[in-house]
């Protein structure tokens, strides 16, 4: 992979403020970076922020990228479930060619774990039918 960086002025949107532009020449490497930005914008909502204050704007995207990193790290350490991925490949024909889980898969798994933990609250007691239905409804909503 080839990398180059340059500090320059980006006239128009940034006026006289200097920026650092990083150029990457490696399709796969660039794709993962572009996908991370797309996930932060589209899945985590950084692209829909309605911030007005300058500091809020400066915090929104870095926070979304931090959350993105934390979700992936959690999934790699605790959430990866090969049996669930295999079941999804069998159930959804469009998923069969995928070699790795998408960010949405990781986020869905994290939501399921958080919902189950919230419902059970560490209790060893069996959940009520209402709690079970709430978890199922939340899982379906998280997967949608």
Image: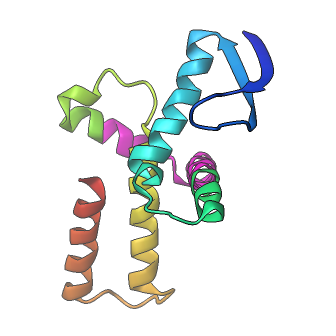
Give the image location of residue 63, x and y in percent: 62, 57
Count of numbered badges drawn on the protein: 0
Q: Which residues are magenta?
A: 64-87
Give the image location of residue 122, x and y in percent: 51, 86
5 in relation to 142, above or below: above
Which of these two is toward me, 106 or 120? 106
125 in relation to 61, above or below: below
Classify residue 109 as left or right of residue 80. left
Q: Residue at x 29, y 41 (%)?
A: 87
SS assignment for the magenta stretch, majority? helix
Q: Quadrant of the N terminus?
A: top right
Give the image location of residue 105, x and y in percent: 39, 46
Give the image quarter of residue 138: bottom left
Give the image quarter of residue 137: bottom left
**75 within the magenta span:** yes
Q: Using the rendered image of the protein, determine whether residue 57 is visible from the camera's viewpoint.
A: yes
> What's the image's color scheme?
rainbow
11 in relation to 46, above or below: above
**12 within the magenta span:** no
Q: Residue at x 51, y 64 (%)?
A: 52
Which of these two is toward me, 95 or 68? 68
Q: Using the rendered image of the protein, determine whether residue 81 is visible from the camera's viewpoint.
A: no
33 in relation to 111, above or below: above
Q: Residue at x 56, y 11 (%)?
A: 27
Give the image location of residue 134, x and y in percent: 24, 79
Classify residue 31 as left or right of residue 29. left
Q: Residue at x 73, y 27 (%)?
A: 9
Which of these two is toward me, 90 or 58? 58
């Amino acid at each position: 992979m080839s990398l180059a960086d340059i500090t320059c002025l980006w006239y128009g949107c940034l006026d006289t403020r200097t920026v650092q532009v990083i150029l990457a020449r490696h399709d796969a490497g660039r794709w993962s970076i572009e996908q991370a930005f797309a996930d932060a914008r589209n899945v985590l909502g950084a692209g829909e922020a309605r911030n007005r204050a300058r500091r809020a704007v400066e915090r929104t995207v870095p926070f979304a990228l931090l959350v993105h990193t934390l979700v992936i790290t959690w999934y790699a350490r605790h959430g990866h479930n090969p049996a669930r991925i295999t079941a999804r490949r069998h159930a959804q024909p469009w998923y069969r060619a995928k070699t790795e889980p998408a960010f949405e898969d990781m986020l869905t798994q994290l939501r399921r774990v958080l919902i189950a933990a919230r419902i059970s609250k560490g209790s060893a007691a069996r959940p009520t039918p209402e709690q079970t239905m709430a978890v199922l409804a939340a899982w379906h909503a998280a997967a949608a």
